[in-house]
Amino acid sequence: MNAAKTLRTLLAQDKCHVMPCCFDALSAKLIAQEGYDLTFMSGFAASASRIGAPDLGLMSYGEVVDQARNIANAIDIPLIGDGDTGYGNAMNVRRTVTGFAQAGCASVMIEDQLAPKRCGHTPGKAVVARQEAYDRIKAAVDARDALREDGGDILILARTDARHEHGLSEAIERAAVFAELGADILFVEAPKSTTEMQEICSNLPGPKMANIVEGGETPDLPNAALHDIGYSIAAYPLSLMAAAMQAMVTSLRAMRADQRPGLMDFGELRSRIGFDDYYAASQAYASSKRD
């Protein structure tokens, strides 16, 4: 079963899938090892990890696709890639969708922000006019359909950030048109209350994704509540990065004081990275002893 088909199967379940977001191949591998069904390459976290810079449109298309390819190659669960604004006009969007599919992503997110985009829970967001937003999603859907004709596949996750600048009604209206155009998953970013989240899910068809940023604008609800509201996916874009950064800073400060921080056991560390699997597989190619 390919990644896109697996993701469709997951979305058909009566369940809100908890989706910790990754930023590199190792973080994605840990997510898969802990039994999660899917993951998302957070643009915020990937930008911080790969180039040490904020998610303000600084990473190029090539860098993002390369990061997604490395992640997809390291795991056997569906990966959703962050395609940002599609990196240009409608034809660039088509290339972006095709590139993410070729990299091994089960889905790609395309959004309606004005380039350069910004993190959905930071100041200064602006969105393009409706028609340009619709053209982006139409181009993404066209690219998906062309891939299917050639034996490939990918799902389109359509995102709108219109809530921030134009209000919830505009955001819902845009997302509804995205669905009419053929988007597979809808994502209305940054609702500010449980009531707004309920309004989103009751007025939009198909699978919806909630984006839970600890300390962000959207309420951090229990998974059961998100399911009852109508969400199929609950994304946690910064949880792992925040945990990793906190652990690294704590360890560095402890080492400065000539203390030894609490660490993962070396044997478990090697095993999770893949040393044990490598050595087991390599036994099939061990050279026989010479006379």
Image (tube, grey):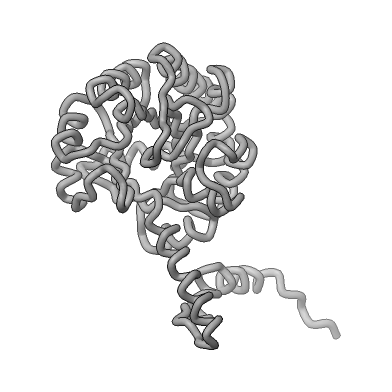
Quadrant in the picture for residue 281: bottom right
The quadrant the C terminus occupies is bottom right
Along the horizontal axis of the image, is 268 left or right of 196? right
For the point 27% across and 18% down, which residue is it? 173
Q: Is residue 135 above or below residue 88?
A: above
Quadrant in the picture for residue 14: top left
- In front of the other: 125 or 190: 125
Q: Is residue 104 above or below residue 243?
A: above
Residue farthest to the top, as pictured:
131
Residue 41 visible, this angle = no
- In front of the other: 38 or 86: 86
For the point 41% across and 59% down, which residue is it? 242
Residue 229 coordinates in the image, percent (x, y) = 15, 39
Residue 96 coordinates in the image, percent (x, y) = 56, 29
Q: Is residue 102 above or below residue 149?
A: below
The quadrant the N terminus occupies is top left
Along the horizontal axis of the image, is 269 left or right of 221? right
- In front of the other: 47 or 225: 47
**What count of labels does the image hold?**
0
Residue 247 coordinates in the image, percent (x, y) = 45, 70
For the point 25% across and 23% down, which residue is it? 172
Residue 218 visible, this angle = yes
Q: Is residue 178 above or below residue 247?
A: above
Residue 89 coordinates in the image, percent (x, y) = 55, 18
For the point 35% across and 56% down, which residue is it? 36
Along the horizontal axis of the image, is 33 left or right of 146? left
